[in-house]
């Protein structure tokens, strides 16, 4: 009996010692939070929305008061403007009041409020925002602020501990931790950011907040999560801070971002393609077509070339080339290595600016906000190309998408140029907004149509099944 008690006591002591040892091995985040937490801010962005009656035809004052009390955003009181509010995070990058956050946090905001941990509040203005990388630069009128330190995301290792500070669901300065799950992730429709994937708990409100390494350096901006529920499911994605800092420099200097282009259509190199082209393994970007008059044509690039490096950096996949080219300044010369007829060849190429970026610059955050325009039956707003845009884009006609409403029926993006509408074999080139809307108005609600788009350097076809009711 005594031996049994001794054995139990021994095992309990051993268990406690092991637990204490494991606890000592876990990282301590307290110092990081104490030193860097004051540089993280809560961002509240307010924008006006159209006033709508929650229950059509409801005129009863008592019933309206019920909905005012329980759903105040949709039915504001007399004299109040209906508005929506988004909450996110940001962080101070310089003591004179510059702040980095996500573009989607402040998109279309009419008023932006920045709140510090000590309850100080400042109104902020947008210096610039870049939707393609989801980076925005804000400025508040303040001085001698605590700013973050920057780290090198290229030195991050998979499995390394990282920490996020932000305001999930509005709970300010919440701290969560995890590890780097992967690096250089490509996400659908996100070609310009090599995301850092982590398992740090990120939720709505964390967007725009910093991702720290264990040295207390910012290595990324928390931007997206993968979720089927709207909440955290173990996959979070951050924009590498070197990408964000390059974007903010351009936003600060020019108010917009200029990206390079070379004018080629490309596709992934499969194992079968690599074998047929004599490559030792699948890598690079296969050139399938070259735009006339483009930098690629002038540099002597040929269809069937496989681009395997750009500016000395390897190209393993299509997205690698897209990012490297986009991050190179228009007008600069770059060195490119291609695989052609079983041998490597070096090519010097001078980049141009992406036409899509020139179009997007028309709706720069610094420009006056245009008057509200009714969307068409696709739930989008389009505008006719100016003479300068036609020249820059090398197009005779087309309609640029200036706004995509939440209920849009077509998978188009702001900056796309719609060239043609196809319905029942009939192809119609688009020249004016009136013509386009008239065509849509004449279609049945269940009509199936196809739109031909110019998107960046290439063409795309988008099929739409069903239209909204005629207005």
Image (cartoon, rainbow, N blue to C red):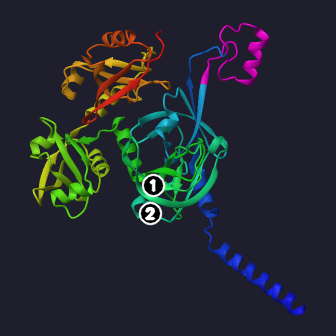
> Residue 65 placed where, x, y %?
76, 15
Q: Which mark is residue 196?
A: 1
Dot placed on the residue nearer the N-terminal end, 2 or 1: 2
> Residue 89 placed where, x, y %?
56, 43
Residue for badge 2: 156
Q: Residues within 10 Å of mark 1 (few under 14, many from 20)?
A: many
Q: Is residue 447 above or below residue 416?
A: above
> Residue 365 placed where, x, y %?
42, 29
Q: Is residue 463 above or below residue 3?
A: above
Q: Residue at x 29, y 38 (%)?
A: 258
Q: Specify the quadrant of the image occupied by residue 119.
A: top right
> Residue 232 placed where, x, y %?
59, 48
Q: Residue at x 29, y 13 (%)?
A: 432
| Residue 226 or residue 238, whichever sits in front | 226
Q: Residue at x 63, y 58 (%)?
A: 34
Marks 2 and 1, Cα distance to the nearest angstrom? 9 Å
Q: Which mark is residue 227?
A: none
The reply, left or right, for residue 300 in relation to residue 233 is left
Give the prevailing secondary structure in the magenta stretch.
loop
Q: Which residues are magenta?
A: 55-83
């Amino acid at each position: 009996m005594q031996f049994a008690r001794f054995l139990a006591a021994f095992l309990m002591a051993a268990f406690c010692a092991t637990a204490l040892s494991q606890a000592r091995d876990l990282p301590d985040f307290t110092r990081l939070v104490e030193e860097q937490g004051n540089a993280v801010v809560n961002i509240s962005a307010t924008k006006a929305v159209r006033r709508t009656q929650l229950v059509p035809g409801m005129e009863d004052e008592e019933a309206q008061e019920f909905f005012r009390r329980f759903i105040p955003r949709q039915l504001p009181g007399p004299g109040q403007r209906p508005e929506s509010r988004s909450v996110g995070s940001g962080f101070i990058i310089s003591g004179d009041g510059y702040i980095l956050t996500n573009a989607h946090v402040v998109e279309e905001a009419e008023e932006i409020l920045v709140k510090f941990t000590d309850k100080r509040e400042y109104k902020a203005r947008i210096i610039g925002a870049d939707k393609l990388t989801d980076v925005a630069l804000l400025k508040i009128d303040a001085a001698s602020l605590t700013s973050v330190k920057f780290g090198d995301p290229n030195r991050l290792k998979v499995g390394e501990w990282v920490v996020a500070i932000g305001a999930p669901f509005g709970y300010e300065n919440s701290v969560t931790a995890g590890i780097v799950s992967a690096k250089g992730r490509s996400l659908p429709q996100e070609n310009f950011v090599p995301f850092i994937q982590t398992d740090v708990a990120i939720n709505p409100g964390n967007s725009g907040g910093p991702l720290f390494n264990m040295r207390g350096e910012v290595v990324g901006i928390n931007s997206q999560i993968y979720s089927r529920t709207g909440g955290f499911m173990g996959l979070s994605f951050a924009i590498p801070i070197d990408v964000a800092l390059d974007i903010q420099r351009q936003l600060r200097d020019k108010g917009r971002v200029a990206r390079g282009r070379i004018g080629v259509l490309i596709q992934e190199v499969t194992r079968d393609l690599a074998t047929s082209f004599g490559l030792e393994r699948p890598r690079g970007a296969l050139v399938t077509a070259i735009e006339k008059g483009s930098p690629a044509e002038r540099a002597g690039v040929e269809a069937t070339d496989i681009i395997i490096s750009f500016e000395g950096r390897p190209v393993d996949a299509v997205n690698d080339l897209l990012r490297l080219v986009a991050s190179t300044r228009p007008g600069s010369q770059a060195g490119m290595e291609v695989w052609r007829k079983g041998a490597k060849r070096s090519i010097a190429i001078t980049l141009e600016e992406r036409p899509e970026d020139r179009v997007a610059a028309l709706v720069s955050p610094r420009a006056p906000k245009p008057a509200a325009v009714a969307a068409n039956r696709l739930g989008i707003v389009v505008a006719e190309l100016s003479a300068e845009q036609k020249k820059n884009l090398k197009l005779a006609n087309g309609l640029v998408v200036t706004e995509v409403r939440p209920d849009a029926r077509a998978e188009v993006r702001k900056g796309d140029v719609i060239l043609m509408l196809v319905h029942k074999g009939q192809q119609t080139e688009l020249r004016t907004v009136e013509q386009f809307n008239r065509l849509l108005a004449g279609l049945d609600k269940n009509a199936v149509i196809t739109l031909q788009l110019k998107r960046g350097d290439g063409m795309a076809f988008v099929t739409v099944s069903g239209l909204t009711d005629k207005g």
